[in-house]
Image (cartoon, grey):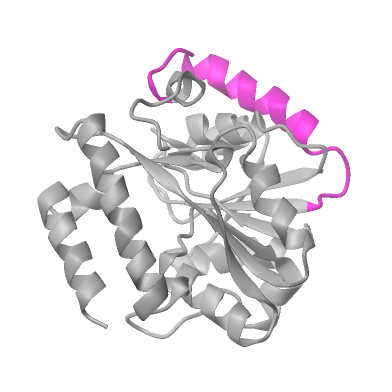
Amino acid sequence: MRPIKIPVSISKYIERDFSTEELLQLAHSGYKSLLKNDPEVSIIIPAYNEELNIVPALASLCQNKTARSVEIIVVDNNSKDQTAQLAKACGVNCISETKQGITFARNKGLSVARGKYILNADADSIYPEQWIENMVKPLEDERIALTYGRFSLIPTGDTGRLTYFFYEYIAEFSRFINKKVKDEAVNVYGFNSGFRRTQGLSVGSFNHPIHTNEDGWLALKLRDKGYGKLHLVTNIEALVWTTDRRIQLDGGLMNGFVKRFKRMINK
């Protein structure tokens, strides 16, 4: 069952239980433990003007529990704020991509990544301690080409967490319909998915046709290339918490629901 309330293990990052300086230290010290030697896993985070979100996101990732060696790459995509400076202060690798757009940013990160496995993350999301392990472990099975996970919403506007709790079950039903009548690949989100680096490069990275999304299209390419099936990670320990700003950009929850319903019924 999904949590109605945001767990303390997640809320401590977003309710400012820590000062910015404490979060920076938490990320910096955690990353030293996370990157043990040559990385087995590379986490790529595209970022544009994310100074309010990047430190909590990185702190949560750097507190993950795994025996694997993990590198984190933030791709600053022409931010006008302190995104790059804050990412560097966390101790992670921060690089620049001057071509504007999330596809260019994800491709740049993939081009410099060293890990066998790639995990896609976003700067406005908080990651539970077992996220890395839960997303990577299934990829050890050669029959699986890509993992993707579930998420819950962090309210930033007037919509409360209880409303989103019910909305998320409706959204899950729409994703079930997508898998049955459309294509499972449309359920893949770039802030919560993983694949093998060499396979991602072999299918042209995140490049995609116009009017499609880079994350779902990559999933489609990997599967159709014969690298394996798509795998939904359902373990509650891998549930990612992300802000509701995409819904806010859609004009609020009701407009977002209508758009989702239209996508569900239009094959």
Residue 233 locus on image (x, y percent): 57, 53
Please indicate, yes or no, whether residue 212 appears anywhere in the rendered image: no
Q: Position of residue 107 (x, y in %)?
A: 58, 69
Q: Does the stretch in magenta take in 16?
A: yes
Left or right side of 210 for 197? right
Quadrant location of residue 264? bottom left
Q: Position of residue 109 (x, y in %)?
A: 62, 60
Q: Is residue 205 above or below residue 27?
A: below
Report the side of 136 relative to 129 (left or right).
right
Q: Nearer the viewer, residue 150 or 26?
A: 150
What residue is shown at x 42% (from left), y 35% (from top)?
53
| The N terminus sits in image quarter | top left
Q: Left or right: 68 with respect to 79?
A: right
Q: Which residues are drawn in magenta?
A: 14-40
Along the line of sight, which residue is nearer the eye, 237 or 199?
A: 237
Whether 212 is drawn above or below 187: the answer is: below
State yes or no: residue 56 in magenta: no
